[in-house]
């Protein structure tokens, strides 16, 4: 199975301590039955072959190999989103972990993005709960689900996306074999009116709050001539008729320059960021970015470079154009819809990012029928940004329930 464009990049920029693991799980209203969970995973394995793969090296490119079924269900012992052995001959790049009444699926980002992972985990949850009519497991995998849709929907278009400038960097000591996770829940009936009152979407409102939290948490940001910027993933499926279960996401970096004012209030950040997100995430702008990105990755000279050299080229390129233009990551998966019979047995949904190569803090957001959930994760012990973010939301009049290290660390 060929790698999609994003997966190829993730494999090239991996390190020993990091290979970009993402996690989605469910907190049920009942204790997890390990054997029933194993049967559910085995039952859906033929329907979702792209989630049971291992990476392989060719001379000029990596590729994925579909693996025979192996038991990937384990008691949760290690810290969440710990790195995978990507090139294993014995086990695919997926783990299903459980503890008490929680189970979660973890995969490297090379396998799929958050939207595709949500499709897989919903199918697993339905099978585990015995709701067989929620998904047809007799149906074979559809060709569209296994497609690399970056080149498929790329068209020759004029236009160029301006280069991103370097951003101010949030530096905190990296802790080995560790991931701190802090979860905040805000009622939708609180945050929706708050965002609407500012004339913003929820993503825009949270973007401003998160940017201001970085500004307040670290005095070095205030006098910096570099902007504080967030990377905002954009799901390309909203622009194209795609059903791929691989990656199909592109990114935009947005922020403000602290040195432009002597002191910034949250209102100042709101005004500075107002109207910035929508123009750069229109269908036209994202099609231009898609075309530019695919053209670069498909360069025939680059494709002819052996993997051993290509990997270092990708790493350098990612450092210069992938990590330097951002301070942090804010990914909003949107509303995760569950059938009523499933939702009544689920207490909470969670999505966590294992972080990026150089960034100490990432935020993943999703909502269910009742609350907006904010998961802040990073391989550092500092909680200064998290504290400032939730303090600001409370000052805005929102009710915030914070869970502190609710996942046990190894």
Image (cartoon, rainbow, N blue to C red):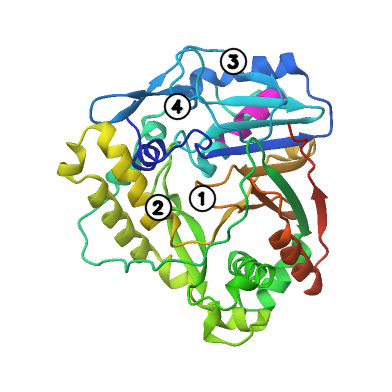
Q: Which class describes the residues within 10 Å of circle 2: few (<14), some (14-19), or many (20+)?
A: some
Q: Which numbered disc covers residue 378?
A: none
* Residue at the spot of label 1: 358
Q: Nearer the viewer, residue 258 or 300?
A: 258
* Residue at the spot of label 4: 50
- Going from N to C along the chain, the mark reached first, 2 or 4, is 4
Q: Is label 3 in a helix, a strand or a loop?
A: helix
Q: Are marks 2 and 3 in contact (CB under 8 Å)?
A: no
Where residue 197 appears, as percent x and y from the top left, is: 69, 78
Mark-to-mark CA distance, 1 and 2:
9 Å
* Residue at the spot of label 2: 319
Q: Nearer the viewer, residue 126 or 81?
A: 81
* Residue at the spot of label 3: 42
- Queried whether the magenta region covers residue 162, the answer comes back as no
Report the side of 302 relative to 250 (left or right): left
Q: Is label 1 in a helix, a strand or a loop?
A: loop
- Queried whether the magenta region covers residue 126, the answer comes back as yes
Q: Is label 2 in a helix, a strand or a loop?
A: helix
Where residue 175 appears, as percent x and y from the top left, is: 64, 43
- Going from N to C along the chain, the mark reached first, 4 or 1, is 4
Instruction: Specify the quadrant of the image occupied by residue 285.
Output: bottom left
Mark-to-mark CA distance, 2 and 4:
28 Å
Where residue 34 appears, as percent x and y from the top left, is: 74, 17
Mark in front: 4 vs 1:
1
Q: Are marks 1 and 2 in contact (CB under 8 Å)?
A: yes
- Write down the region rendered in magenta: 119-128
Q: Which class describes the residues within 10 Å of circle 1: few (<14), some (14-19), or many (20+)?
A: some
Give the mark count.
Answer: 4
- Going from N to C along the chain, the mark reached first, 1 or 2, is 2
């Amino acid at each position: 199975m060929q790698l999609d464009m994003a997966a190829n990049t993730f494999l090239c920029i991996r390190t020993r301590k990091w290979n970009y693991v993402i996690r989605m799980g469910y907190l049920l209203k009942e204790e997890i039955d390990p054997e029933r969970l194993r049967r559910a995973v085995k039952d859906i394995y033929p329907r979702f072959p792209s989630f049971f793969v291992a990476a392989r090296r060719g001379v000029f490119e990596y590729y994925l190999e579909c693996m025979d079924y192996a038991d990937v269900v384990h008691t949760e012992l290690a810290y969440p989103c710990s790195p995978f052995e990507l090139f294993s001959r014995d086990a695919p790049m997926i783990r299903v972990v459980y503890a008490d009444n929680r189970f979660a699926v973890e995969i490297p980002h090379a396998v799929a993005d958050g939207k595709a992972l949500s499709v897989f985990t919903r199918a697993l949850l339905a099978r585990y709960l015995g709701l067989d009519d929620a998904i047809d497991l007799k149906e074979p995998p559809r060709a569209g689900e296994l497609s690399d849709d970056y080149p498929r929907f790329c068209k020759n278009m004029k236009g160029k996306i301006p280069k991103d400038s370097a951003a101010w960097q949030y530096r905190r000591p990296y802790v080995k074999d560790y991931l701190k996770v802090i979860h905040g829940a805000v009622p939708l009936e609180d945050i929706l009116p708050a965002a609407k009152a500012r004339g913003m979407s929820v993503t825009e409102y949270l973007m401003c709050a998160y940017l201001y939290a970085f500004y307040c948490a670290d005095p070095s940001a205030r006098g910096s001539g570099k902007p504080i910027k967030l990377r905002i993933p954009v799901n390309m499926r909203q622009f194209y008729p795609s059903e791929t279960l691989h990656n199909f996401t592109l990114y935009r970096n947005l922020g403000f320059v602290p040195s432009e004012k002597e002191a910034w209030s949250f209102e100042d950040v709101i005004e500075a960021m107002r109207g910035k997100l929508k123009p750069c995430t229109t269908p036209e702008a994202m099609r231009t970015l898609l075309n530019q990105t695919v053209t670069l990755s498909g360069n025939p000279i680059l494709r002819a470079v052996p993997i051993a050299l290509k990997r270092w080229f990708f790493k350098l390129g990612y450092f210069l154009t992938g990590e330097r233009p951002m301070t942090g990551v804010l990914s909003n998966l949107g509303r995760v819809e569950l059938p009523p019979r499933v939702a009544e047995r689920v207490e909470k949904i969670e999505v966590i990012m294992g972080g990026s190569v150089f960034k100490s803090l990432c935020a993943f957001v999703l909502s269910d029928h009742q609350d907006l959930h904010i998961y802040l994760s990073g391989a550092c012990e500092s909680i200064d940004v998290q504290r400032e973010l939730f303090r600001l939301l409370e000052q805005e009049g929102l009710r915030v329930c914070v869970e502190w290290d609710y996942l046990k660390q190894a």
